[in-house]
Image: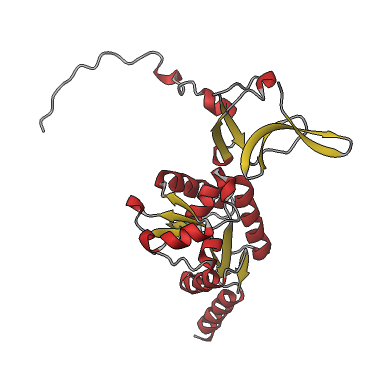
């Protein structure tokens, strides 16, 4: 391989200031190792903005909190509902 | 001369006081466990995962093992057993298993400065110099369960070789969680 002078233009004035591309997913996902993605079926969470076909990210290490949309296992099936407490009992509420 | 001997004795005594400590963590019935995270209807029932081309059983849930399904059993030998006991049969999904394995290793990275991935479901973790190793291992097990959803078992001992023997014993006896010597 011989030495060849190749013109490469002049260095970009922005070369020192480049940042990573915008990655909105990284704004949503705090802990990728424990975050799993699901696709919503049905409209039972429409009032909180989750529509049929939407992609939802669930963090298994997230804190259990009342009023939060969480993933539950009910009779062997996964369902996304809001956890509420009424009369000393927990309820899994839809939002539509 | 005497001074040299006494220095070596001290070093030897120090090594014996704090022996090397290695933990081996293995995931129970890993392929089945990975599938169960995404389909909870597989929990508590006999499940087998088949090899490429759906040839043989390469993973069995404890319930399937109790029914006598052997590792590597060709599926055409199992047809009656599958029908009689309602065994759930799944094709393998290596993309899934690889991803779940990576997630488990990431949890291990929080519990040891040196993690060696031995296979898709087994890792060695350096526990050298750790205090309260069993409590640490129990916390590791709980963390993997919470963050990934896969059950793991941990054996703690002085060497990798002794670990393999220990894990074979662990698997055969279906001992749970943490085992230390």
Can you say whether B153 is above or below A73 in the image? below
Q: Position of residue B176 (x, y in %)?
A: 62, 65
Outermost residue on the right side: it is A87
Seen in the image, is B91 located left or right of residue A89? left
Q: Is residue B3 left or right of residue B70?
A: right
Residue at horizontal 49 percent and vertical 68 percent from the top: B68
Instruction: Please state the horizontal and vertical placement of residue A78, each as a whole percent of the image.
Output: 62, 39
Vertical relation: B133 (above or below) B50: below
Report the quarter where the C terminus of chain B lies. bottom right
Residue in the picture at 49% in, 85% down: B1
Q: Residue sitting at 54 percent across and 67 percent down?
A: B66
Of the pair A35 and A96, the residue shown nearer to us: A96
Q: Position of residue B46 (x, y in %)?
A: 54, 58
Q: Pick out the residue farthest to the left.
A: A2
**Residue under the image location 51 percent in, 48 percent down:** B35
Tell me which corner region of the image, top left, top right, bottom left or bottom right, holds residue B12: bottom right
How many marks the image carries: the answer is: 0
Residue B176 appears anywhere in the view? yes
């Amino acid at each position: 391989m011989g030495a060849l002078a190749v013109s490469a233009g002049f260095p970009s004035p922005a070369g020192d200031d480049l940042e990573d591309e915008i990655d909105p997913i990284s704004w949503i996902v705090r802990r990728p190792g424990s975050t799993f993605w699901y696709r919503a079926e049905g409209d039972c969470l429409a009032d909180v903005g989750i529509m049929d076909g939407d992609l939802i990210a669930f963090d298994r290490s997230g804190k259990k909190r009342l009023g939060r949309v969480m993933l539950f296992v009910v009779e062997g099936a996964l369902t996304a509902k809001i956890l509420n407490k009424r009369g000393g009992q927990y309820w899994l509420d839809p939002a539509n | 001369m005497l001074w040299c001997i006494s220095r070596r004795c001290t070093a030897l005594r120090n090594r014996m006081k704090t022996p090397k400590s290695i933990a081996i963590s293995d995931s129970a019935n890993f392929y089945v466990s990975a599938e169960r995270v995404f389909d909870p209807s597989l929990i508590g029932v006999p499940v087998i995962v088949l090899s490429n081309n759906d040839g043989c059983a390469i993973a069995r849930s404890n319930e399937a093992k109790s029914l006598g399904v052997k590792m590597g059993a060709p599926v055409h030998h199992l047809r009656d057993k599958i029908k009689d006991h309602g065994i759930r049969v799944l094709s393998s999904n290596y993309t899934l298993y690889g991803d779940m394995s990576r997630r488990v290793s990431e949890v291990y990275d929080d519990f040891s400065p040196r993690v060696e991935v031995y296979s898709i479901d087994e890792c060695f973790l350096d526990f050298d110099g750790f205090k309260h190793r069993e409590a640490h291992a129990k916390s590791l097990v709980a963390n993997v369960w919470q963050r990934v959803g896969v059950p793991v078992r941990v054996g703690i001992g002085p060497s990798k070789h002794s670990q393999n023997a220990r894990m074979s014993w662990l698997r055969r006896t279906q001992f749970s969680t943490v085992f230390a010597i």
